[in-house]
Amino acid sequence: MNEQTHWMDINERFLAAMATRVRLRLQRMAGPALRCTPRADASSESDPEPGWEERLQQVEQEMQQLEQHDPPPALMLLAERLGLTAFECEVLALCAAAELDTRIAGLCAAAQGDGNRSYPTFSLAFSLFDNPDWGALSPHSALRHWRLIEINQPGSQTLSVAALSADERVVNYLKGLNYLDDRITPLIDPVRAEAAERPSEHHALPPSQQQLVDRVIAHISGNRNEERRPVIELRGRDAESKRLIAARASASLGLNLYRMDIRSLPGQTGDFETFSRLWQRESLLLPIALFIDTAADEQHSILLNRLLERNVGTVFLSVKTQIAERSRHRLLIEVNKPSPQEQHDLWAEHLPAAGHETPRRLSEQFSFTRSEIIHLVSGCKNVNGNLKSELWPELWHACRVTARVGMEQLAQRVEAKATWEQLVLPGDQTALLQQIAEQVRCRHRVYEDWGFRQRMNRGMGISALFAGESGTGKTMAAEVIANTLGLDLFRIDLSAVVSKYIGETEKNLRKLFEAAQDSGAIVFFDEADALFGKRSEVKDSHDRYANIEINFLLQQMESYQGLAILASNMKASLDKAFVRRLRFIVDFPFPGREQRLEIWQKIFPPETPVEEKFDFPRLARLNLTGGNIHNVAINAAFLAAQANTPVTLPLALEAARAEFRKLERPVKDSDFSCRPGLEAVL
């Protein structure tokens, strides 16, 4: 017989003795009433048993002996953990006996001299047990505070004669069945961390996160004897790592971790009070801990404060930024994803055949948790469980898709299709763009391997300004860089960022940069002067808050570690502080005739039918930007499709005429004529 089975046997014997003791006391109290009541069967089971006084003494002695067992029966454990007095234990025993022995109801009615009161009451307990304590009726008594009994008090009935019954959860606890109260289970979910109970070497956490687990364990272990249990505040954006650290620490301490969203906290006072009391009771009866995902909502923050003030056991708070000091002692833990080197080691561990280059590139560009890395690798393995070289592009694509989830909700993803061959710029500008792409590729080597990160705490991202007129190729250049690096390109929608409400713009910017940091993507601020404009002299409150937004944006740009591209056709409107922080400024000039000729020669896809002797030099004389030339080529192609002919020079000139009119530029019929020797528009 193992220890648990032996304890269950002791507990069952104690419960049987407890119920017998209550029954015998009721029989003694109801004796005169039982003898005066005519019965058809004189040997009714409600009659006092022969030698009941000796039997009562034997039962009480047996209970005293069983109470000395280590660990003691469940009732003694309950009394110790919840602080019940001796008389409160007697009242609970009376109510529990009514659930365990069907004869108790009739004896309660007989003992109280009222056939309708076939239930326990405080009045009955005062007469039944020695040393009654009137304090048991108080709402602050342990019996009522912990909801160990339920009181049915209809109308104007006095509390002393109201019907009492034992809480179902408590009755089952006394039976040795210790489970979470089903009234709070709909609000919480168990957290099952991967191999949390037996973390093997294969499931080991990265060293940086394991150090945090050890720190949490030491803190909780050192505060076990404190009156109030600790609050562990896990700060950071990586929700998965925070849950994993909390689960590993809880498992090491023998605690079962449950997760709760702060929005699930009951808002009504009565419901909130019930939940907090029940959870606090469960934390004393069960080895459990609570993981709360917090929110910025003020109402929920107030509820969270009230909950923590109740000393509801060990609590892990998941927060993004530091919250106000609580009344309870707390430990602040900064949680981040595994370091770049740890991510490299994880990739290398699960990609043994990939060599050094693939793990290096993956860890440089993306930031994943341990479980995400394992999931990504397993999802790209073939049926034999191997990751062959031809599947590595598939893995890179899977990383891009996984990383951009948060960013897709805040910005528009641009499908990058342009290549260096399609981009027509002067040599200096092209060299600058290629330098930007190479810096993104080599940043890990410079920052990590060559030690620059140890000397820098900001400005480790790469920011570039693309300045030039509309249509000169700024967006296309951003696409080329994204396509070259195999990264996603997101265009920032300023209408979704800028808000007229105070503080909302900063909140939107914070969400945007946090998502961009995790995505590994390139962010593209089109029409950047609308957001990065100059700070103005403060003349009213609007100017002051506008300047605050710009200052906040400056801070975000400095801390951002990815590639951010700003495009503007009003370079002079940008704040000088932004210009100082830009690593590259690429001026996109209006294309000259040679550039326009090259653009025209590349503008039509190979599949487009173009007349054999198409006069590209003739079209290159038209003063149009690359974007305008693209519009002309598209319109000419549609005109050709409608006429069911190849694209001809007259059709292209007709489309060009329409483009000039759209730009509100002077148009002469002779300028777009195909007659030989006619001077073109310069």
Image (tube, rainbow, N blue to C red):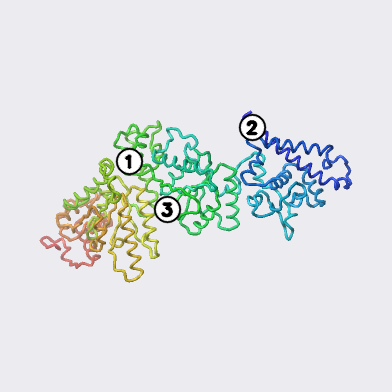
How far apart marks 3 and 2 lie (CA) works out to 47 Å
Query: Extreme left residue here?
Result: 677
Look at label 1 and name its amino acid.
Answer: Leu
How far apart marks 3 and 1 lie (CA) works out to 31 Å
Q: Quadrant of the C terminus?
A: bottom left
Residue 374 visible? The answer is yes
Vertical relation: 577 (above or below) 365: below
Look at label 2 and name its amino acid.
Answer: Thr
Could you tell me which secondary element the residue under label 1 belongs to? helix
Q: Quadrant of residue 157?
A: bottom right
Which residue is depicted at the point 61% across and 44% down?
81
Residue that badge 1 annotates: 362
Give the side of residue 608 with respect to residue 126, left or right.
left
Can you give x and y, in whole percent of width and height, for residue 168 in the image? 66, 46
Residue that badge 2 annotates: 5
* Closer to viewer: mark 3 or mark 1: 3
